[in-house]
């Protein structure tokens, strides 16, 4: 927890923010710089100047969580989030109190921060932290998790991040209008259609292809940026800054060959696992390839073609348009059929460092590298399962099994129990890559 000087540092940082804004040295409406980034950057500068040490006095973090009745799913996810460094520091510094605009009390965020405070207590006073109050507040916010039945860790993670974001959203009063910035790009589409007709002329084919590629790439980038800006006007928090990315869904009409794109925000990638015979290993690359491969849609399941103005057969392909700082990968091990739920126990191998998602992003975006720092595991069957976590700290990997905490070697991470993978974007990635 921060020492007594932390209050003075936070106060001086807040005062500096107000001074800079009042003197118009910084503009509040700047779209590319969120207030959280501004606040964190200024606090870091002040702390480095005042005391060349970490702004937080932290314990080892190797503290267990009490299971209060089938809550291993909660314990595993909280341990993974606890080792998400930026979120941990934000919570322990209680930065949300300085930037929160919502009129609602941040009860869940406060309870979450208190749990993290216990896990990272500099005195290491408790070997186990009790999350009862945190879970109670969460269940009040999400009644679906009431009771003591086993829950899905990935579902819990999604609900938790969503509720935390809602409490600390800096844009809580901006409502969705339903009107997205679509019309301004019609001219790009009509221009590309005209040029495509022109490309039938042999002597212009090469020039037209090059220009079409340039025009299309820039049109897609501009449209994606506009949609992202629109999203940030409604939703802006540390959760968005860390976990949110942007997916591009590209549709190609089989009748008129028209291409159209839609963009959606994601906080995790849920990857299908290819079917393999027993004992055969699958790689994370194969899961990513299956996720992004072209899918054929029949008339009944396809959206309306913008040019044909009717439902037609088309193909759909997913790619990553904007990469998040923290990449959460859900290995979709559970399959629901009409009568039952089954679990895949296929071993999925994954890179510990330098996971490159560049090939799944925009054309020519270059390498986009990620390093693994936490894993949420699921052992057992659908009805008799148990969640644990593996997390990386400054001293290496550690295995978290509710109250029990033990050291772990890197070669013990690769198992067929891996369920949710947490990756941090590497500093090696080019700063020009979104």
Image (cartoon, rainbow, N blue to C red):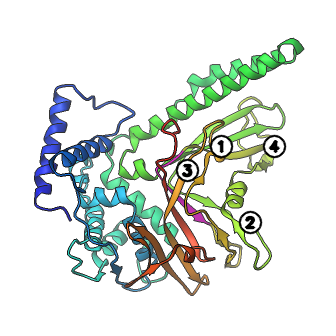
Q: Closer to the camera, 401 or 427?
A: 427
Q: Secondary structure at mark 1?
A: strand
How far apart marks 3 and 4 lie (CA) works out to 36 Å
Residue at 83%, 13% (x, y): give it.
Answer: 204
302 w.r.t. 199: above or below? below
Q: Earlier in the sequence, mark 4 or mark 1?
A: 1
**Residue 243 drawn at (x, y percent):** 45, 53
Query: Which residue, given by chain and number where applicable, does mark 4 sit on?
Result: 313
Query: Which residue, given by chain and number where applicable, does mark 2 sit on?
Result: 274
Please identify the quarter of the rendering in which residue 417 is found. Answer: bottom right
Q: Closer to the camera, 285 or 184?
A: 285
Q: Earlier in the sequence, mark 2 or mark 1?
A: 1
Foreground tag (4 vs 1): 1
**Residue 12 drawn at (x, y percent):** 12, 44
359 w.r.t. 380: above or below? above
Q: Earlier in the sequence, mark 2 or mark 4?
A: 2
Q: Earlier in the sequence, mark 1 or mark 3?
A: 1
Q: Residue furthest right?
A: 202
Q: Earlier in the sequence, mark 3 or mark 2?
A: 2
Query: Which residue, given by chain and number where applicable, does mark 3 sit on?
Result: 369
Segment tinted magenta in the rendering = 323-331
Label for residue 249?
1
């Amino acid at each position: 927890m921060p020492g007594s000087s932390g209050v003075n540092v936070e106060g001086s940082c807040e005062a500096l923010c107000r001074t800079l804004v009042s003197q118009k040295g910084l503009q509040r409406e700047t779209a590319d710089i969120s207030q959280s980034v501004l606040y964190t950057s200024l606090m870091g500068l002040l702390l480095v100047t005042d005391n060349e040490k970490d702004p937080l006095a932290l314990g080892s973090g190797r503290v267990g969580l009490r299971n209060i009745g089938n809550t291993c799913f909660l314990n595993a996810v909280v341990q993974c989030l606890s080792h998400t460094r930026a979120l941990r520091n934000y919570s322990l510094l209680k930065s949300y109190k300085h930037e929160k605009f919502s009129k609602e009390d941040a009860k869940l965020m406060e309870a979450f921060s208190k749990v993290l405070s216990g896990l990272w207590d500099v005195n290491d006073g408790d070997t186990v932290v009790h999350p009862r109050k945190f879970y109670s507040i969460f269940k009040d916010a999400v009644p679906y998790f009431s009771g003591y039945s086993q829950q899905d860790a990935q579902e819990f993670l999604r609900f938790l991040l969503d509720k935390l974001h809602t409490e600390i959203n800096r844009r809580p009063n901006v409502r969705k209008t339903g009107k997205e910035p679509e019309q301004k790009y019609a001219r790009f589409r009509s221009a590309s259609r005209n040029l495509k007709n022109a490309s039938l002329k042999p002597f212009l084919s090469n020039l037209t292809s090059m220009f079409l590629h340039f025009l299309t790439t820039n049109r897609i980038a501009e449209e994606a940026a506009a949609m992202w800006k629109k999203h940030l006007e409604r939703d802006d928090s540390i959760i968005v800054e860390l976990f949110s990315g942007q997916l591009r869904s590209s549709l190609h009409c089989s009748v008129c060959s028209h291409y159209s794109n839609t963009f959606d925000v994601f906080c995790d990638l849920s990857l299908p696992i290819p079917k393999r015979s027993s004992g055969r290993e699958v790689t994370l690359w194969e899961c990513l390839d299956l996720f992004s491969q072209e899918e054929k849609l029949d008339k009944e399941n396809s959206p309306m073609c913008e040019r044909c103005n009717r439902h037609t057969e088309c193909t759909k392909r997913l790619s990553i348009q904007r990469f998040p700082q923290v990449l959460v990968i859900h290995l979709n091990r559970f399959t629901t059929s009409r009568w039952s739920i089954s679990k895949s126990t296929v071993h999925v191998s994954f890179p510990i460092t330098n996971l490159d998602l560049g090939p799944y992003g925009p054309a020519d975006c270059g390498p986009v590298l990620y390093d693994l720092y936490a894993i949420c595991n699921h052992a057992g069957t659908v009805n008799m399962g148990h969640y644990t976590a593996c997390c990386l700290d400054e001293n290496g990997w550690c295995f978290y099994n509710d109250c029990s905490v033990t050291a772990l070697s890197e070669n013990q991470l690769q198992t067929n129990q891996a369920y949710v993978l947490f990756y941090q974007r590497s500093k090696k990635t080019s700063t020009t890559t979104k």
